[in-house]
Image (cartoon, rainbow, N blue to C red):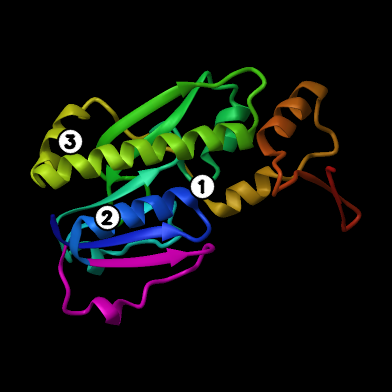
Amino acid sequence: MFNSILFLGRKNCIYSNKLKKYLAKNTNKFFYFESNSFGDKLELNKFKNKKFDFIFSYRSFVIIKENLIKKCVYAPINFHPGPPEYRGTGCVNYALYDNSKFYGCTSHIISSKIDYGKIIDVKKFRIGKNSSVDSVLKKTHKLMFERAKFIIQSLLKNPNNINKFMSNSKKNKWSKKIKTLKDLEQFYIIDKNISKSEFIRKIRATNTNKFKPYILLHNNKFVLN
């Protein structure tokens, strides 16, 4: 059993709920925060005098800062929905735009910088020619859950196994490039002078069930249906 865990999940995420239930069963003192959108923040006063064996972040919008990182006895761990080549926001969009052949997920120690801490695990899968943002994300979130549970189970047996994970992943390095939310918002705008080949790439990389690329013309926004 873990002594104390803080789990940061996402609202309406089936895998966050599964991890939440699993961790709650295997932790003496379990704390959970569910985020819904960018900008959601923890009320740090609730954790003023608390220590955690681990902090686990799965699809959370919360940015963990140094004062919370220091509350970990072993390590804060994030499960990132993208391989080390793609850091920050919109990883899957840029991977599809680049016509990458592989995608996946990265587990890493959380540091004060986004997607920067030591990598402890990387798993990839092949992207099909007809793969979309939605289909790739579906595979990614499932794979993230499987790797998260595998890592958590290992740490339950021995928390110091975190050192083995880091040692086994020494060769995995983060890309120097990192994308922000502003970068992604700009990426969704289609230039009216775009070539046909780039237009096809851009549509594949941005068209989802929830979000759509668009053209700005004379202060009007024309969204792809």
What residue did someone put label 3 on? 166
Above-or-below relation of 41 to 178: below
What residue did someone put label 2 on? 23
Q: Residue at x 24, y 40 (%)?
A: 151
Q: Position of residue 202 (x, y in %)?
A: 71, 32
- Sequence order check, earlier mark of 1 and 3: 1
Above-or-below relation of 174 to 67: above
In this rendering, the label closer to the viewer, 2 or 1:
2
Horizontal side of 168 relative to 61 (left or right) equals left
- Sequence order check, earlier mark of 2 and 1: 2
Horizontal side of 151 relative to 32 (left or right) equals left
Q: Position of residue 180 (x, y in %)?
A: 52, 50
The residue stretch that appears in magenta: 30-52
Regarding mark 2 in the picture, which secondary structure is present there?
A: helix
Please identify the quarter of the rendering in which residue 44 is found: bottom left
In this rendering, the label closer to the viewer, 2 or 3:
2
